[in-house]
Amino acid sequence: MKPKFPGPCPCGRPLAYAACCGRYHAGSPAADAESLMRSRYSAYVLGLEGYLLATWHASTRPGALDLASGPQAKWLGLEVKAQTEAGDQATVEFVARCRVGGRAQRLHELSRFVREEGCWYYLDAMS
C-alpha cells in the first residue's frame, strides 16, 4: 500500500515523495544501498513497519517492530555522510535527527547492506 504524502520526500532528496521513496514503498526495488537507506528513513517517518521488515535481511531481521508503542519519534531530517559499494555489499554512513518526548536526538550510524537476487537489504549497523 502506497501512502499519500504531499510535498518533498522525507529522505531529503529534492524530489516529490511519489517520485522518490514512494516508488520503493510501492514495491519497486531500490537501485542502490543509499536509496534503500533513504527509503527506510522515510518508512520510519511514515510508520511503514511492513516495509522496514521486508527490506531487513532475513539473517538479522527482528520478529516484529512496534513503532506505535512508547513515545513517538518526530523525525526531523537525514544527512548522508558517505556511501561505499563493492559488488553486492555496501555501507552508508548517515545522521538522522529526531525528537522523542521533547528531547532532540541524533542517530549517527554506519549501516551495512547486502544485495541478493538484485534486491538490496539492510543488514546491520557497524560499531
Image: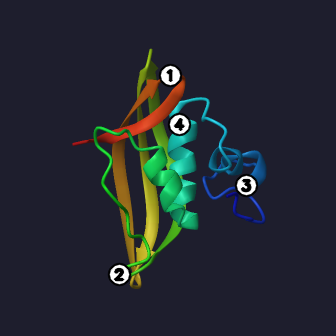
**Circle nearer the N terminus (2, 3):** 3
**Dot 2 alpha-carbon crowd within 10 angstroms: few under 14, some 14 to 19, many 20 or more:** few
Q: Residue at x 53, y 67 (%)?
A: 47
Residue 83's spot in the image, x, y percent?
Answer: 46, 31
The answer to whether the residues at label 3 and label 4 have Cβ atoms under 8 Å apart is no
Whether 65 is drawn above or below 12: the answer is below
Real-space CA distance between mark 3 and mark 1, rounded to the nearest whole angstrom: 26 Å
Whether 26 is drawn above or below 30: the answer is below
Q: Residue at x 60, y 35 (%)?
A: 30
Residue 64's spot in the image, x, y percent?
Answer: 35, 60
Can you tell which quarter of the image residue 46 is in? bottom right
Instruction: Name the residue that disc number 1 marks.
Output: 117
Residue 78's spot in the image, x, y percent?
Answer: 52, 54
Pair 1/4: label in front: 1
The disc at residue 80 is none
The disc at residue 17 is 3
**Circle nearer the N terminus (3, 4):** 3
Instruction: Name the residue that disc number 2 marks.
Output: 70
